Image: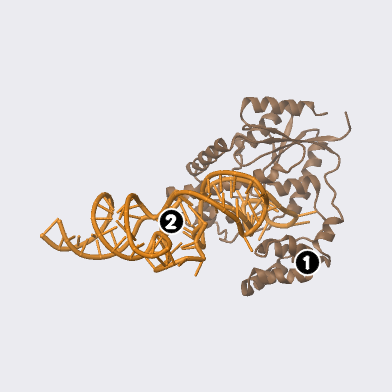
RNA sequence: GGACGGGUGGGUGAGUGGCUAAAACCAGCAGACUGUAAAUCUGCCGCUCCUUGCGGGCUACGGAGGUUCGAAUCCUCCCCCGUCCA
């Protein structure tokens, strides 16, 4: 037994049943859910981001959802701060925090911390983006190579997004990315963390993904997108980059989205799931369970891990 | 029945004598990723062997023959698809 609070993390690819398992465990252990998902922090984008409707939350409080408006910028650092606040609050009320994680970067930001690097600067980014527009990503990569050779070596010449971030750090902090990273970061303190990973068979996961996309469409995803447009959410708002949203946005005149659009969304979701799997595979100390979060054997096994934890 | 056009690797599709296991794109597979992360990017992608190399062998551009040192590319016949004329 220790005086550390405990934190249960359930991680896995999209549609693996993290939410179902989280809710089930929460109900049995007086838990509350912290959602670690970069898309669900956006308000009004509900169906396509697979937010759990209130009615299906079965009385279990859910946090870290609907934090910002569509036009706002949200970052891993901001997530970390908000998550720590929620964790503290849950701890003080003596509840059991259960984090359901689909966004690997955010999970790492919370658990391991972030280096002491400057936050993004929109003005600087606009300028750098203009350079890329005018002279191509390789040009910016050459500039980075001059300012921070180590970072330039690590980042692909066409990876504009990462090149810009490295440039931003170098310019704003006056230090190279590597230097800042080597100065360390401080992870989440005061918690005993147990991680459960869901890894259902790939073919069955893909079947579920396809079925879930169909269900989202049936649940009125296209209408949600229509409302977002009517609401005045601009096409370049961040959440319109999320899987499916821009495809459906271009289809709003057509009523029901055609089959090929639905297939495209399913395909993009499958590829996304693969990227999540690749990321989570490297996550240390995960108790992997080879099924879905609503499989009874998985629930039983997960309960063991939850019970083993000191209260 | 006749006249054209066309049949290329999982898909679309370039290639019209050697530099072509065959562009490009898509799909697929694998991977990277410390502040946009459902994002962004990278590699592989006919089969096979090994001493894993700008390595060897085999198979491949509808089918069968042929021309040629050499053919997806030229010729002959056949099959199939599309359009048009009967």
Residue drawn at (71%, 71%) of the image: A142
Residue drawn at (83%, 44%) of the image: A188
Q: Check the image and report above or below for A99 versus A70.
A: above
Horizontal and vertical percent position of residue A224: 52, 49
Does residue A96 appear left or right of residue A250 in this picture? right
Of all chains in the rendering, the one displayed in orange is: B
Q: Quadrant of the C terminus of chain A?
A: top right
Horizontal and vertical percent position of residue A275: 63, 47
Residue A163 visible in this rendered orientation of the protein: yes
Label 1 CA crowd tier, 10 Å (few <14, some 14–19, many 20+): some
Q: Nearer the viewer, residue B39 or A157?
A: A157
- Secondary structure state at the residue bearing disc 2: helix
Q: Nearer the viewer, residue A101 or A228?
A: A101
For disc 2, the marked residue is A253
Horizontal and vertical percent position of residue A34: 72, 40
Horizontal and vertical percent position of residue A140: 69, 70
- Secondary structure state at the residue bearing disc 1: helix
Q: Quadrant of the N terminus of chain A?
A: top right
Q: Nearer the viewer, residue A301 or A258?
A: A301
**Label of residue A160 in the image:** none
For disc 1, the marked residue is A149
Does residue A243 appear left or right of residue A102 in this picture? left
Q: How many marks?
A: 2
Picture colour for chain A: brown
Q: Check the image and report above or below for B30 versus B16.
A: above
Q: Check the image and report above or below for A62 versus A308.
A: below
């Amino acid at each position: 037994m220790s005086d550390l609070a405990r934190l249960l993390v359930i991680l896995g690819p999209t549609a693996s049943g993290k939410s179902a398992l989280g809710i089930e465990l929460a109900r049995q252990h007086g838990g509350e859910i912290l959602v670690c998902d970069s898309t669900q922090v956006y308000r009004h984008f509900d169906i396509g981001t697979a937010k759990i409707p209130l009615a299906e939350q079965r009385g279990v409080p859910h946090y870290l959802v609907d934090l910002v408006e569509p036009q706002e910028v949200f970052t891993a650092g901001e997530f970390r701060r908000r998550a720590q606040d929620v964790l503290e609050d849950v701890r003080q009320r003596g509840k059991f925090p259960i984090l359901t994680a689909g966004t690997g970067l955010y999970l790492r930001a919370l658990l391991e911390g972030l280096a002491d690097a400057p936050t993004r600067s929109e003005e600087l980014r606009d300028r750098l983006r203009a350079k890329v527009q005018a002279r191509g990503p390789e040009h910016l990569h050459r500039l980075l190579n001059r300012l921070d050779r180590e970072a330039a070596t690590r980042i692909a010449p066409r990876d504009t997004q990462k090149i810009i971030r490295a440039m931003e750090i170098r310019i704003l902090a006056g230090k190279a990315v590597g230097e800042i990273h080597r100065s360390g970061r401080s992870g989440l303190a005061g918690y005993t963390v147990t991680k459960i990973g869901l890894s259902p068979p790939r073919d069955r996961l893909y079947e579920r993904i396809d079925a879930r996309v169909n269900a989202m469409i049936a649940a009125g995803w296209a209408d949600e997108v229509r409302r977002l447009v009517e609401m005045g959410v601009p096409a370049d708002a961040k959440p319109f980059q999320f899987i499916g949203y821009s495809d459906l946005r271009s289809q709003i005149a057509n009523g029901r989205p055609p089959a090929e659009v639905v297939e495209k969304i399913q395909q993009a979701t499958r590829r996304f799931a693969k990227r999540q799997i690749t990321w989570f595979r490297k996550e240390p100390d995960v108790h992997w369970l080879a099924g879905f979060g609503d499989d009874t054997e998985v629930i039983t096994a997960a309960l063991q891990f939850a019970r083993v934890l000191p209260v």
